[in-house]
Image (tube, helix red, strand yellow):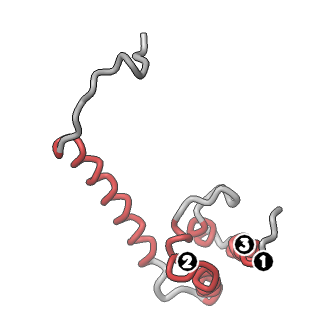
Amino acid sequence: MPLNGSDREFTPYTAEKVDPLVDQAITHLERQIEQLRSLKGATPEIAMVIGKAHEIFGDLGALWLVRQNQVLQARPLDLIAQGKTDQVLQLLGQIEYGVYV
């Protein structure tokens, strides 16, 4: 039988317990850094997407590209890698002009 909130025994957080969580976050961030590095020297189409994301989101534009997007149901960077820059640009345009579809 699963424990409910009042039946659980409190377990204090310790470095031993949270260090693996920190390591997991670092691994995730390192993957994102590699993905961002892959954008350097981009083709003109990809450069257009990166520039538009920066225009809309400022310094966070490149990070927007590596995060899961609910509307696209994918990460923008994954769609870009598949040659679907038009979908990403369309969404950026909708965001820029406040168009909800």
> Is 96 in front, or is 42?
96
Looking at the image, is 30 positioned above or below residue 92? Answer: above
* Amino acid residing under circle 1: Tyr
Label 2 element class: helix
Q: Residue 33: x, y in percent?
A: 39, 71
Tell me which residue sits at (45%, 77%) in the image. Answer: 38
**Residue located farthest toward the front when viewing the structure as drawn:** 6
Disc marking residue 97:
1
Tell me which residue sits at (57%, 59%) in the image. Answer: 68
* Amino acid residing under circle 2: Gly
Tell me which residue sits at (58%, 87%) in the image. Answer: 43
Which image quadrant is residue 85 in? Answer: bottom right
Disc marking residue 61:
2
Q: Quadrant of the C terminus?
A: bottom right
Marks 3 and 2 in Cβ contact (< 8 Å): no
- Please identify, in this view, whether the residue under mark 2 or under mark 1 is nearer the observer: 1
Q: CA distance from mark 3 to mark 2?
A: 12 Å
Q: Residue 15: x, y in percent?
A: 17, 46
**Residue located farthest toward the top when viewing the structure as drawn:** 1
Q: CA distance from mark 2 to mark 1?
A: 16 Å
Residue under label 3 = 95
Q: Earlier in the sequence, mark 3 or mark 2?
A: 2
Marks 1 and 3 in Cβ contact (< 8 Å): yes
Label 1 element class: helix
